[in-house]
Amino acid sequence: MIPEIATRTIAELAPRIKTGAVSPVELTELYLQRIEKLNPLLNAYVTVTAEQARSQAKVAQSDIAGGKYRGALHGIPVTIKDNLATKGIRTTAGSKILSDWVPDFDATVVTRLKDAGAIILGKTNMHEWAKASNTINRFFGAIHNPWDLNTTPGGSSGGSAVAVAADLCLASIGTDSAGSVRTPASLCGIVGLKPTYGRISQHGGVPGTGGHSINHFGVFTKTVEECAYVLEVVAGHDPRDPLSVDDAVPRYTDALGRPSDSLKIGVLDSYFPENMSREVRQAFDAALGTLKRLGMKLESISIPHMDLVPTVFACTMRFEDIAPHDRYLRTRPRDYSPRLLYNQIGALTIPEATYQTAQKVRGLIRREFAAALAKVDLIVAPTMPITAPTLEDCERGYTEIDGRRVPLQDGRGNFLTLFTIPFNLTGLPALSVCCGFSSSGLPIGLQVIGQPFQEGRILQAARVYEQAAGYYRKRPVLPITE
Amino acid sequence: MKELIRKLDKEYGIGLNEEEIELIARQAEESTRLYQKLYEVAAAEESFVSTGEGGDKQ
């Protein structure tokens, strides 16, 4: 029997699929029915691959019945952000320019999911070219947050986060060059992991959807345990991505049960406190209290050049990501939305010397983080300064925070990603887990950051926190039942 | 900056109007001002290293 939607997780389903108590065919059908009912409301999917999913589910069911069970993702329905190549399935990157592109190959993460027996339900909607975080897509429509349909789910992987939060799939793979996994995970109340740079192969990512040195592939799930299962499958060296690291992939699920009461947790003393809203501060302070009660020791840490993170980031991202767009700017410039076109032309004005200078300062910031992480095991911070702004706020470009009008975009860059970009610049692994709700019922995320390739320790601490805090049990109320 | 934007517009064959050129130039100028701070910090860091205070960066 298939568990109720509220308690349906990979951890719950995998043993039942293995024994044949849950049928992948029936499970897939339930998700397809749910997508049919809810996607018109949420717009999380840009392409639903129903027939292919049914066919994969039949093969999975037959293999499992024949004793060929492959592991925890076998028969599990998942989705893929639409900037990752999928063989025979349209891959748009949220753009008009690639709206008809059908790749003849799979991204390595897709191959690994298929090899693990996962069922691909479809491709998730995203911000155009992954270039902003409100996921109001001019060509494929705005995505709606299941906690409040008038608010943004964040982005750019907004469709992936909504698909997981609204139980339209069990896990999703997104990309994160500025926080595009962690910010929508935070706004949708789920888990989003951006692992260390090089941990997951980026082969098959659409060029032009994230600067080469700051982009990462990441994982969305409802719980930390599920995230560990998915990471074990998609992580690891890939000869087709020379920047992927050739180290063995640990069994992340083994880390989940380890004691966390001796962990030293760093709390940054600047940049974050002055930018967060009152409600985010309250939730963050409560999370710190929970970590202390769990026996972890808190320590204040400083990053002297933290204030330069947004400028270094903006320069790096814009300079690195303009080259793949050169031919489209020359041939189809008006097929970009106007705001993106103007940003792209602005990026062409950045001199090489400025980029190189930004990399020097980036090196300084990385060394400062390395020194801080030599003193503590993990760092925690809010994932975002605020809860989900309304779609209307996103359109007009500002929001109200504690009575102040705050621009969502200014010279420093995107306000919504201020707290996530430090870990794109440094390449450090970072995970967002729900740490509470605002007075209007919108989720708030806690970011857990670790030393390079210490995803196991992050998952360990986040799991202990998640179980103690219990916010993962709260689900958005949607106007359908199964 | 406006001249640079006009040059890019011509090179890429985009066909920007004057309002668009002004908007892009204004944004690019703002970014350029912010990037100046990076040069100052990088220069200070280089001088820090060259005076022997940079430790393992020597």
Image: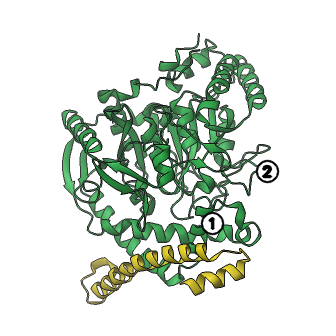
Chain colours: A green, B yellow
Residue under label 1, please give it: A341
Q: Are marks 1 and 2 in contact (CB under 8 Å)?
A: no
Residue under label 2, please give it: A100
Residue at left offset 22%, top offset 33%: A294
Residue at left offset 34%, top offset 83%: B40
Closer to the camera, A236 or A328?
Answer: A328
Which quadrant is the C terminus of chain B positioned in? bottom left
Above or below residue A436? Residue B9 is: below
Asked if badges 1 and 2 are on one and the same chain, I answer yes
State which chain disc 2 sits on.
A
Q: Amino acid at mark 2?
A: Asp
Residue at left offset 59%, top offset 28%: A168
Residue A95 image point, x, y percent:
68, 54
**Quarter occupied by residue B21:** bottom right
Left-right relation of A204 to B36 = right
- Secondary structure beneath dot 2 equals loop
Residue A313 image point, x, y percent:
44, 66
Number of numbered tags placed on the structure image: 2
Q: Is the residue marked by circle 2 packed among few (<14), some (14-19), or many (20+) residues within 10 Å?
A: few
Residue A99 image point, x, y percent:
75, 51
Q: Earlier in the sequence, mark 1 or mark 2?
A: 2
Residue A385 visible in the current orientation: no
Residue A169 visible in the current orientation: yes
Instruction: Measure how far apart labels 1 and 2 are at the Cα level.
Output: 20 Å
